[in-house]
Image (spheres, rainbow, N blue to C red):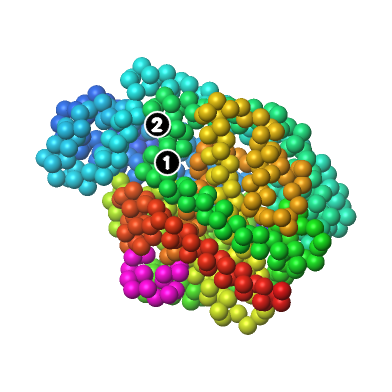
Amino acid sequence: MKSNEVPERNSIPDNFKWNLEAIYNSFEDWQKSFDDVQNKIEALKNYSGKLGEGSKTLLNFIKDDEAVSLEIGKLYAYANMKSHEDLRETKPMELAGLSESLLVKYSSAVAFFEPEILSLDNDYINNCIKTEHELARYEFFFRKLLREKEHVLSHELEVLLAKVGELKAVPENAFTLLTDADIKFPDIKDEDGNLTELTEERWNKFSRSKNRDVRKNAFIGIYGTYAQYKNAIAALYSGSVKGDIFYASSRKYKNSLDMALFGENVCEDVYNHVVDTAKNYSGLMHKLVSLRKKVLGIDEFHFYDINAPISNTPQNEIKFDEAVEISLKALEPLGEDYIKNFKQGISDRWIDIYENKGKRKGAYSWGSYGTQPYVLLNYNGTLNDVFTLVHEMGHSMHSFYSRKNQPQVYADYTILLAEVASTTNEALLLEYLLKNSDSIENKKWLLDYYYNMVRATFFRQAMFADFERQTHSLAENGGILTPDFMNNLWEKLNSECYGSEMKIDEELCVEWARIPHFYSAFYVYKYSTGFTAANAFASSILNHDDGAVERYLKFLQSGGSDYSLNILRRAGVDLTSTEPFERTMKFFEKRLNEGFEIWGM
């Protein structure tokens, strides 16, 4: 076998693979658990219509439901992770398909629960919690559920809304089919002059090419193609927005943004802070554009220059053991307990480390309440891979602490909190590497990495959030979402974000048409809040603020035991205040000034 050839999985030593046998020792054990849980799912249906019969019945349902969902979580996680080891293997794919069907069956069986609880009197639920001490732990769970009652309609209308749900999904499904299957992009020449088919995935690579012609041609190929479909995509997006407005109105929310924020009990101030901070500190992005323009040595800066490398990628290979040691040193500020558990995760084989033939690409953290955390990597020895390691282990350590300290009902943290721990780890690693690197080139790469993170995770997502708010507001006030309106809005937002030194090409104005997140309205702001909270935590920890580490560990341990903003506030980060947002921007400014110094600008 060639030294650089991707190995077969069976040639990789077991100590470099995750230990899925800790969940099920064999496919036969998985099948036995799968067969056993089928009858338990059916038994859950027997509680339908009986939840109002007393606290014992309510408690028994919750216990039985948790036992079933615990096993389903293990079945689902194992089958899918096993299939990702080698996507060519049919047996794990079969198990993954079965687990998906099982999840649908379970969801159908317990679909009665929420409507039935919401049909009961609040006093009945409160009395059950008082009289049945084991129900006390579910108080927040019920409080959160009962809060939805004001937006629940009559049974007949709920049935009607459920049927309309299929229509609401049409714009997103059509957009996905159009952009993934029907739209074809032109061929372009790559760095070697070879004619290459352009795809969305290859755009990510071409946009980072050192060859400006490659970047420009890829940009024109992608964005120019979307421009040809702008009328159809505008109609699809308009349909999605109208669906949001219909549901918000039907369920008696103030507007569609209010509906999106209600579930996690997020006040509109938080959303406003994201958008306003990006606007108020847009001068920093203008300064970054200026830095990139000067380093690249170009007369006119375009969007296709935004990802152009302004540093050389470090070439020295970092062995995985070395990557672990670097990570441990970088994360030392989190304290002995965190480091001990991180090391335990490595020795307990949470991680599937190396690439093998057929293995799923990318990286993720997974597992369930009934398992240890798991991390899929495709480690290749680069500095970027070290960041991926600490990022995914940040997710897994968050899951570890949550599951260890919370009952099953509160073990999962919300999407609003999901990227905080992973990004905190990245911030700590970046600080450690910048302080300990004696290579100017490595420092340039690290700063470039950070700048890209700030732009993509905060400013770009804030611009998306602003776009969504303005399009929904226009439609809610009777306006029409035409392609021209959205093109003009997108041009304005990009001009505000990047400043006068970036030329806004005509093709860029239609970028709104290629953003799939817009079909899940008011979601993207959470990337910005997660980045902000993570930077606030990292800053406090590195400054050795009193109790900073203890508060952060408490955050990791909290899972979903309260509303996300309350969990963050108790840990020292108040997103209803502008303070953490301003702190993040001031740190960005500090790093920008370092960049101007290190590049000699």
On screen, 309 above or below 228?
Answer: below
Identify the residue at image location x=63%, y=53%.
Answer: 497
Whether residue 381 is visible: no
Occupied quadrant, residue 268: top left
Amino acid on which the number 2 mark rests in the picture: Tyr
Q: What stretch is highlighted in magenta?
A: 538-553
- Verify whether residue 542 appears in magenta: yes
Percent across and percent down for residue 489 are: 65, 40
- Verify whether residue 453 appears in magenta: no
Mark-to-mark CA distance, 1 and 2? 10 Å
Query: For this view, does 95 lie left or right of residue 252?
Result: right
Which label belongs to residue 261?
1
Identify the residue at image location x=53%, y=68%.
Answer: 587
Q: Which residue is disc 2 drawn over?
A: 253
Q: Which of 367 and 485 is in front in this view?
A: 485
Identify the residue at image location x=47%, y=51%.
Answer: 273
Which label belongs to residue 598?
none
